[in-house]
Amino acid sequence: MKRELIHQELSYTVTGILFAVHNELGRYRGEKQYGDMLERCFKERGISYEREAVLPTSFVGEKAGRNRVDFLLDNKIVLEIKAKQFLEKTDYYQMMRYLEACEKRLGILVNFHQRHLASKRIVRGYADHS
């Protein structure tokens, strides 16, 4: 059974940008530095985005603005950037919560600290390596 690739063109473009940023900055920068360069690349490529997009509250009494995604791209893809030794299960669970909260189907989780960059496509319901 062949699965449809969600937001194929945009996700391929974003993946290319992630590799370009990793190649230019290397693997020992902070998340904010990667975010700044990604933002510049999104502007240059004409990709609409919202940086640190605020998620809606998930329960009555939750402090508004508490949860934010690193980037919401073209109002379609949630991009979460990490700069740590290893991705953990909690990173995947965080992305799943974000996808549910903002009612999006596709998230890309990337860890810039790895020697060889490998972004993870996460679709509500399952994770897929890209």
Image (spheres, rainbow, N blue to C red):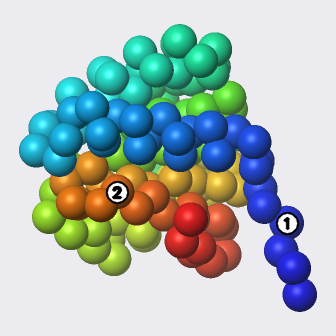
**Residue at position x 35%, y 46% in the image:** 81
Q: Secondary structure at mark 1?
A: loop
Residue 77 horizontal/vertical position (percent): 63, 43
Q: CA distance from mark 2 to mark 1?
A: 24 Å
**Which numbered disc covers residue 4?**
1
Q: Which residue is mark 2?
A: 117
**Residue at position x 48%, y 63% in the image:** 120
Please indicate, yes or no, whether residue 61 appears anywhere in the rendered image.
no
- Which residue extends farthest left? 28
Amino acid type at circle 2 is: Leu
Amino acid type at circle 1 is: Glu
Q: Local crowd at mark 2 within 10 Å, few (<14), some, or many (≥20)?
A: some
Q: Secondary structure at mark 2?
A: loop
* 47 displayed left or right of 57: right
**Residue at position x 68%, y 32% in the image:** 75
Q: Quadrant of the N terminus?
A: bottom right
Q: Nearer the viewer, residue 127 or 66?
A: 127
- Which residue extends farthest right? 1
Residue 25 horizontal/vertical position (percent): 21, 33
Q: Nearer the viewer, residue 31 or 24?
A: 24
Q: Local crowd at mark 1 within 10 Å, few (<14), some, or many (≥20)?
A: few
* 65 displayed left or right of 129: left
Please indicate, yes or no, whether residue 125 appears anywhere in the rendered image.
yes
**Residue at position x 10%, y 44% in the image:** 28
Q: Quadrant of the C terminus?
A: bottom right
Judged by depth in the image, the label closer to the viewer, 2 or 1, is: 2
